[in-house]
Image (spheres, rainbow, N blue to C red):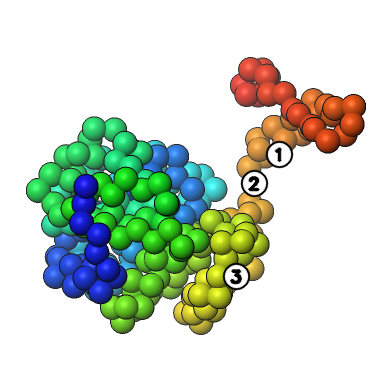
Amino acid sequence: MGRDVMVGELVEVFEGASSVVVAAHLRPDGDAIGSMLGLGLILEGMGKVVSYVHTDGVPGNLAFLDEGRRVKGVEEVGEGELFVALDTANAERLADGGVGAAMAGAVRVTIDHHVTNERYGDLVWVDAGSPATAQMVWELAQAGGWTIPLEAAVALYVGVSTDTGSFQYANTTGRTHEMAAALLGIGVDVAEVNRLTYQNFPARRVELLKGLLGTMERSGDGRVAWWSLTEAMKKGV
């Protein structure tokens, strides 16, 4: 089990490193990709050498966050002084055994907001009261007085937006809105980012939704509804 640290200590750790590898959990969501890219881009702006590793890569709906194709497979990433696992509750969810090679010889840092975090790694910062790991990355930048580039601001905005249901869930705090306001001040185009995040669907997804809705059934009392996904629908037949 790793040692719990405060954000101030992590500021010193990151400022003292010259190379960092960042990673996030398998089947990544907006917070996983947003916090990973957000932290990495901030550190790049500070002159650090940053590698982004992910077995699954960036999902299609979030590809706009990584137009520079920074995120690589395990086989393409070397070692760093720090290996940072973001938004990942346990080491098993990081990826296949190849990630172990990226961790070799590095100080392993865990940054996560899940209450179930198993505190793996060497240095652990878990804040279960935070609605998103992206918000924790923002807090880290605030504590260090670090500049947040626009590309990083967009990634962090997507991270916190997706994990709060577009700021609708009960986990949304006043601090979350302060973060959003600060990111907008950097230049985040809310309308465009929300369009890309929530409204930019491939035709296949719409077709699949159409097929699912066509199978909908309801219980006699109307309180339960269910859909059926067939193998033919999955294959697009």
61 w.r.t. 175: above or below: above
Residue 19 - label? none
For label 1, the SS is: helix
Location of residue 148 (image quadrant): bottom left
Residue 206 - label? 1
Q: CA distance from mark 2 to mark 3?
A: 18 Å
Would you say 23 lies left or right of 185 here?
A: left
Q: What residue is drawn where x is 44% and y is 45%?
A: 28
Q: What residue is drawn where x is 44% and y is 70%?
A: 153
Q: Image quadrant for the C terminus?
A: top right
For label 3, the SS is: helix
**Residue situated furthest right in the rendering:** 220
| Residue, disc 3 | 190
**Residue 36 coordinates in the image, percent (x, y):** 36, 56
**Mark 3 burial class by Cα count in 10 Å: few <14, some 14-19, many 20+:** some
113 w.r.t. 29: above or below: below
Q: Give yes or no for contact between labels 2 and 1 (Cβ–Cβ under 8 Å).
A: yes
- The amino acid sitting under disc 2 is Phe
Give the camera-side residue of 47 and 129: 129
**Residue 194 coordinates in the image, percent (x, y):** 61, 62
77 w.r.t. 220: above or below: below
| Residue, disc 2 | 201
> Which badge, 2 or 1, comes first in the chain's sequence?
2
24 w.r.t. 207: above or below: below
Location of residue 118 (image quadrant): top left
Location of residue 206 (image quadrant): top right
Would you say 156 lies left or right of 73 here?
A: right
Q: CA distance from mark 1 to mark 3?
A: 24 Å
Q: What residue is drawn where x is 63% and y is 54%?
A: 198
Give the camera-side residue of 147 and 151: 147
